Every structure is written in C-alpha cells, then in structure tokens.
Image (cartoon, rainbow, N blue to C red):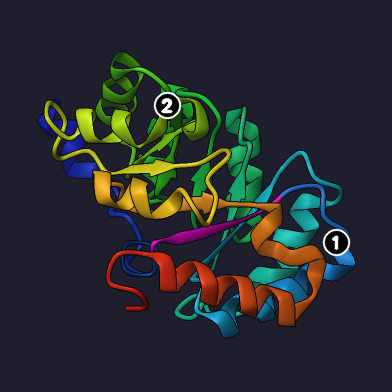
Amino acid sequence: MDESRARVRPPVPELIRVGRIVAIGRNLDPATLPTIADGLRAAGIPAFEITLNSLDALDSIAALAARFDPEEILIGAGTVLEPAQASAAVDAGARFLVMPNTDPEIIRWAAERGIPAFPGAFTPTEIMAAWRAGAAAVKLFPASAAGPTFVREMRGPFPEIPLIPVGGVTVETAPSFFDAGALAVGMGSWLTGGGDPATIRERAAQLIAALPGGAR
C-alpha cells in the first residue's frame, strides 16, 4: 500500500460507519427532498446521497446541506464523473462523494481536500486501484451481480479496505452483505419511499431490524 497516500486518506464518516446505511436519491422531485431527508433523519438513516444526474442536483445539495446539521445526517453527491463535478458538489455542501467507477484523479482530488470518496469497483484490481488512490471506502457496484460471497472473498486479501455494496441491495439481501463483511450498504428508491415520511420510517425500521445487531 502507498504509505504517503494512506496518510492523506480521509476516514469514513462516523455517521456512515456506525449507521451503516446510505440512502440514494436519484431522479427524485427536488421539492420532495427536504421531506425525504426529514424522514431519513427521523428513521435513523445517517447519510443521503443526491446523484448529480438528477434534476437541479447541485441546488438540492446546497439546500439540504444548509437545512440539516451534519452531525445528524450527511449530505453527499453521487454519480460524480468529472473533477469539475466533484468541485462543484463540494462547493455546494456535499460532505462525501460517490462514483460508479474508479477514477484516480477524482479520488486523489477528494483525498487531498479531506473529502471521503467512495469510488465504484467490481474487480480486485479496481478495488486496489481505488484504495491506493486514497478512497475512504470502495463502493462495490453493482452489488446484485457480485453478491455477498464476493464481499466475503475480498475480506481475505483486502481486510483493511472497507466495502460498501450498492446497486440492487434489498432488505432481504442487506443482512447477507453485512455478514460477509460489508461496512455499509447503499439503497435507493425502495428506501426513499416515494417521498412519504411514514413509508420511509417504516421501511427504515424494517431494514435496521434486519441487520446484524439491529439498531446501533
């Protein structure tokens, strides 16, 4: 491992490490996002990722970052594909960055500024490349194709690399990913419940209760 890179690697935010769930908002009505974030916070979901290919994503990130205490819920940016997007998202208030792929330039940019980056990877080579570039954790994507067994096998050669399965994770499969050694999981439309706070709280409670150890 590159020790100089490790020294600048931002840690995984405590809210994500302990809360273990990242909610993903993709192509949602911007007007519903504050209500969704309220529901997530009330339900104990500690992080809300707004994908940059959503309508008015940067404005939404800015509004949510200004509205919520980062010690209660973290607002991040997803589907970050270019360094300029990373910069704009951080300027808007994003406190973590998520990518569908491994882009060392974006990862290094974030690490040098103390911003946790979760790049997407699907192979051992990509996982190690993301880690060496300074990723805080590596997003296993698409997790539905890799499965919990892949996570378990990666814990052998890469025990120090936190993995966050994303993409097709369900309330039924999430416990298996944690049993296999995942740090956290990302979940989208099922968890955000169409913007209804009662549905969000109900589904979040169902998910948390299914996880190893239940609520923390």
Mark 1 lies on a secondary structure that is helix
For residue 109, above or below residue 12: above
For residue 173, above or below residue 199: above
Between 161 and 87, the one lying in front of the other is: 161
Please identify, in this view, whether the residue under mark 1 or under mark 2 is nearer the observer: 2
Residue 72 in percent (x, y) is at 49, 80
Q: Which residues are magenta?
A: 20-25
Residue 24 magenta: yes
Horizontally, residue 91 falls left or right of residue 176, namely right
Kindly identify which residue carries mark 1: 30
Residue 108 magenta: no
Between 132 and 147, the one lying in front of the other is: 147
Q: Residue at x 80, y 69 (%)?
A: 195
Q: Which mark is residue 146?
A: 2
Residue 210 in percent (x, y) is at 42, 66
Q: Amino acid at mark 2?
A: Ala
Residue 172 in percent (x, y) is at 49, 53
Q: Residue at x 70, y 63 (%)?
A: 192
Q: Residue at x 52, y 57 (%)?
A: 171
Residue 181 in percent (x, y) is at 24, 46
Horizontally, residue 170 falls left or right of residue 164, namely right
Q: Amino acid at mark 1?
A: Pro
Q: Which mark is residue 91?
A: none
| First in sequence: mark 1 vs mark 2 | 1
